[in-house]
Amino acid sequence: MGLRISQLLDPSRIVLDVQATKRTNAINEVARRLEGIPQLTNFGAFYTELLARERLDTTCIGNEIALPHARTDHTTEIVMAVGRSSGGVLFENSNQTVRLMFVLATPKGRAQDYLLVVGALCRLLKDPVLRAALLEAQTPEAFIDVIAQAEARAAAPGAVAC
């Protein structure tokens, strides 16, 4: 895959200490990091679509991880914000507690790219050592570095693909 998750991450879009303990408030706290970026042409409309998608079905994928997302006409490219909660956020629609949240906005016409990003995230996040390192990262830059190192290991010659 040419696109790496680490390329989608920006330190200013990573919240290492999400304060909200309820799903909608936590999603808002993290998604707000995308407000005002040039790729997101209408934050309010995107956010409405994000919440509508979340109401359809849980975006929890297990292992205390959720991928709230919206395929929208209000972004020119895939953008991501990340939230981490030490105490956990209750996603009441699935009765799961989430500690890592990856909020995605994807252009409607790029469904294949969305699937590639979600697949790459799932492959990375199934590793308990990586998840532990993400939960321990002290800075947004360190968080990104953990993912970049995992991607480099996965791309190394002889690495086993899942």
Image (spheres, grey):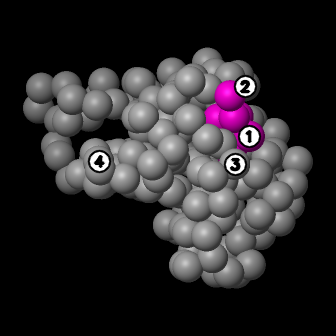
Residue lying farthest left?
Answer: 158
Q: Amino acid at mark 3?
A: Gly
Residue 93 higher or lower than 31, as above or below: below
Q: Residue at x 28, y 31 (%)?
A: 3
Please give left or right for residue 24 compared with residue 151 in the image: right
Q: Helix or strand or loop: what does disc 4 sit on?
A: loop
Give the x, y percent position of residue 112: 24, 51
In this figure, which residue is indicated by the disc labeled 1? 32
Magenta region, main secondary structure: helix
Q: Helix or strand or loop: what does disc 2 sit on?
A: loop
- Name the mark nearer the viewer: 3 or 4: 3
Q: Residue at x 61, y 41 (%)?
A: 42
Q: Sequence-wise, which precedes: disc 1 or disc 2?
A: 1
Q: Are circles 4 and 1 on residues that touch, CB within 8 Å? A: no
Q: Sequence-wise, which precedes: disc 4 or disc 2?
A: 4
Q: Amino acid at mark 2?
A: Gln
Tell me, yes or no, if residue 125 can be seen here.
no
Give the x, y percent position of residue 113: 28, 45
- State the CA–CA distance, disc 4 to disc 2: 33 Å
Q: Helix or strand or loop: what does disc 3 sit on?
A: helix
Tell me, yes or no, if residue 31 can be seen here.
yes
- Which circle marks residue 44 in the picture? 3
Mark 1, other Cα within 10 Å: few <14 / some 14–19 / many ≥20:
some
- Which circle marks residue 110 in the picture? 4
Camera-nearest residue between 131 and 65: 65
Q: Amino acid at mark 4?
A: Arg
